Image (cartoon, helix red, strand yellow):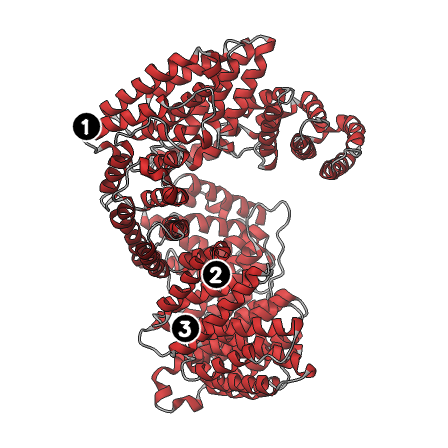
Amino acid sequence: SESSLASILEKLKGNSVTILKVVEQAQSVLINEQDEVRNRGITLLNEVISASAVADPQSLTSLVHFYGDRLQDEPCVKEVLRGLRILLDSLDAPPTGDLSRAATHAVVSVLKFVHVQSLALSDRHNAYFLVEMALDKLQLPLFEQHDDVLGCWVQCMNGERDPRNLLLCFRLIPRIAAACLKHKDSAEDLFNVFSCYFPITFTPPPDDKVGISADMLREALLECLTCHFLLVPLSMDLALSKLAEAESTSCRLDSLDVLATLASRHGVQGSFGHDGSQQIWSSLRLQIVDSGEQEVQERARSCLRHILRIAAEELGDQSEQGGIESSCLHGIMKTLKMQTAVDLKTPQELRSRKGLSTVLCAVSAHPLSATFVLHDSLYALRDIVLASGGESGFACMYASLQVIHEILLSARSLWMYMKGRSAGMKHPLSEFAKDIFDTLTSVFVLDSFAGEESSKLKQTSLQSICELMPVVESRGDVKRAFDMLVGEFVAQTRNADERVSLTRTQISSCLSMMQAEGHPSAKEVLKDFTALCLSEEDLWASSLEVLRTSFSENVEVAKTALDIFLEALRVNGTSSRPGLVFVGLFSVIDSVKSKFTNMSSESAADEALTASCKSVGSMFATKIVPEILAGLSFDDLNSSPFAQCLDPLAGMIRATLQLVGEGEGSREFVSLLLDKCSAPGGSSSFSNEQLRILQSVFTSALPSDLRSLDASKQGCVTKLAARLLEGFEFSQEDQDDCRKSVLAGMMNKFDGDAFESMYQLLVDQTLLPKVSEQKFASTVNRFLAWIAKALVCRGHPKGQVIMQIFREYLMHIDQARFGVTGYEVLGSRDLDKDFSKQNHFVCKPLWRQRFFSQELQFLADGYTRASQESKEFFLMALVHLLHGTPVEAVGLEASRVIPLLVQALNCPAKETKLAALELLFSFFDQGLTHPPTKAVASSDNKHFMEGQLSTLIQALLDCSSFSESLMVRCRALDCLAQVPKVASYHKVYPYRSQVTSALGKVLSDHKRCVRLRGANCRNVWFMLTSK
């Protein structure tokens, strides 16, 4: 009883009795002839040792001995296993001496005397867990003194069906095999007990709480099949038989994984031998050629490539000593080569093409395997191409050209593998690239076909020519081939041929590969292509895409092109197509900056590539842009020869500042730009082009560079800020928000006295006095909102001063729209391209979440207290605030937000309706009505949403027929279709009739997209049948 147990535990705690004394006193119960009495006695003992740890080693040894001996008492085995697990689990380190011997004896007794498969699931798990603990945590010598333990384990596991126990058994088998597998007979016994589970077909139940997946079992069984060299022939035979017999795709995929893993762990020679390799080759070829499953074909090719690569690597230096002829690689490749010769006779047939894919595996696997087939295959295909003619020969020629291209792509993959392994190796195509190159160029030049057939042959041959150009050494041949490629590009561009996109990709890939291989013609062909583009303005847009792509693929191409553009600028100045040259320069720095940004987001960036990107940025900062601006004043930038250069120049400045880091010439670069921008000019007004230059400087400069300016230059910046507002007519709009972003950049990045003087000049002396003037109020408040956002995101208290102005606006109905403007700017995601870390803006972590938390209380309380006429403005401000806040943060306040969003749906402004619908849909779509967070219980959030169902559904139905906005109608129907999925059935079913009836009108909407959404939504609600 519980009282007896409590009494015993109290005595043990007071040391008035020992655990052995308890056992001695319970002896009459523990040896009683009645099974139930003995079982209850052991259960009581289990409760005692579970509640009171046994610290005395002698007592612990005695107890382990006792439990080990009692494992032969079959009626009590269940409780004995549980007690033994409690005892052994209490050990923190491997036992020694008598305790080790006692524990070993107990675990071996589990294997020898317990009929495990007759036990319940949890008791079997205890038995397996004891074995795992003995091998892992306790490191007991189970197999050193007991020869028959392996056989006992086989009997113990045989017939197990529970996934949890099977996973445990699979994880134990490799350790058992490593410890005691010595003979082939015992290997067969062990193999038979687990191979029957191959392949795994387990599907977890819908309410699974254990968390065991089919992949976990599959990987564990794969480990068993490949863990020991004595199991290799058995596993190989099993995999081959399953490949030959199995109908299911998963079984064949698992069999292919077994073969690949055997080769990886034990080698091709050690796993398969010469005869086994031939069997595997035949089986893999059948899967590649005859299988109707694309996934099986791809996995079989991958397996073949893997086996060939391992077989070649096993040879090592033997290939130079003549040992290759007796190798597994030689046996496989000899048969593969013979079959390839047959397939090459009819490359246009589907079965032959599948068979020829084995050549691609051999070529891409290893240089040794490639030597068997690369030369003969390419020359056989070349002969077919040269011999094909007439209408009947087109199919054969076209198929041969396609296979040639596939082989060349595989050779490129092999070359990447070779370069990664060691330097100074010769390209696998170098010996016969010239012959194949000449054949392909002759196909292009001497085309005997016409129409679509001719186009296909030319396009396919050009693809292969591009692959060979980095390998062909003759400059004349490369120049001739590249001219053909560019000729096709020019013709396709001028004819608006849809295939021009593929040709652009070929040119950019060719330029990148030639530069990467250090080809002597790389710079020459790039220079010729760039010169052609600069001379043909109608080609510039399309060719610029080629250049940008190649710049993004290879920074060295960008560096080479940079020299070419600078040379064109030095030769022609700004008199001959300066805009094109400037756009080219901008494309260089922008592509390099994008590549650098993408690398920075990756975990492991290439240090050499990073340095190369930085060097380009430093070159622009210290040399290129200063040279362009040399001798030019800020007012000169509006001169007509320079007018078309301003946009790319602004882009160059922005990208350069984003790319270069502190101490890499950025400080001098910023100082030079400010000297140009802040120099006294003849006019206080700024052109749009000058404003874009200023925007690039102040939105992208490093804060440290601006703050390090001396007092005189900071004063010049303050005067520049004043000029920006003095020359601006506030009754007009600020085009492209240039002035606002410049001032926001200044207020975000400056600090100290410079900041205070700018704030006083811009806000206190210029903007606030104009707020009261009705014709200026809208524009002035938008300027204030931009400045407020720049200050709030950096956490400056002045930001709250301006925000208080917008809060007060909301309190007065005649000014409330200006308050909405403030929240619109603060919540706008469209401005994040300027207010970003990439532009070096000072942004505190989670500033949006903090701003949301701070303003939500004010807007919610204000909405409650506001008059009926003012409520709309509070809702509009709230929607803008929510729009700029991460959805996860909004979800934490769902109980307060959802009711307000439902009210916002009734606002007359279509922008407010649409924004509220987008937010509601994000709730529904991402499941944030059930957020997995401790802050808000999912049931509470669901309750708050369901409490608004009546109002929500009617508001969504009203929005679905809102005639002023197509987007509002569409998004309302999207939200309405989600409601039955997120609300409880008994809550939403009563509205079924109302919704389906109202949606009947939507089906006659004049817009097809609305009718389609209406039909889908109606179907969802129709499916809510009564239960």
Q: Which disc is residue 711 wearing?
A: 1
One can see residue 927 in this view: yes
Q: Position of residue 810 (x, y in %)?
A: 50, 13
Kindly report which numbered mark, 1 or 2, lies closer to the viewer in this rendering. Answer: 1
Above-or-below relation of 1005 to 257: above
* Kind of residue sitting beneath label 2: Arg
Could you tell me how far apart the alpha carbons at marks 1 and 3 are, in whole angstroms? 56 Å
Read off the residue under disc 3. 470
Residue 448 vs residue 311: left or right? right
One can see residue 113 in this view: no
Above-or-below relation of 869 to 141: above
Q: Nearer the viewer, residue 539 or 498?
A: 539
Q: Position of residue 157 (x, y in %)?
A: 55, 63
Residue 1002 falls in image quadrant? top right
What number of labels is visible?
3
> Of helix, strand and loop, which one carries label 2?
helix
Mark nearer the N terminus (1 vs 2) = 2
Dot 3 crowding, Cα within 10 Å, few <14, some 14–19, many 20+: many
Residue 827 vs residue 656: left or right? right
* Kind of residue sitting beneath label 3: Pro
Q: Which disc is residue 171 wearing?
A: 2
Mark nearer the N terminus (1 vs 3) = 3
Q: Position of residue 185 (x, y in %)?
A: 51, 79
- State if disc 3 and disc 1 touch (CB < 8 Å): no
Could you tell me how far apart the alpha carbons at marks 2 and 3 are, in whole angstroms? 50 Å
Above-or-below relation of 203 to 730: below
Q: Nearer the viewer, residue 601 or 314?
A: 601
Q: Nearer the viewer, residue 488 or 262?
A: 488
> Of helix, strand and loop, which one carries label 1?
helix
Point 45% across, 27% down: residue: 734
Residue 631 vs residue 587: left or right? left
Dot 2 crowding, Cα within 10 Å, few <14, some 14–19, many 20+: some
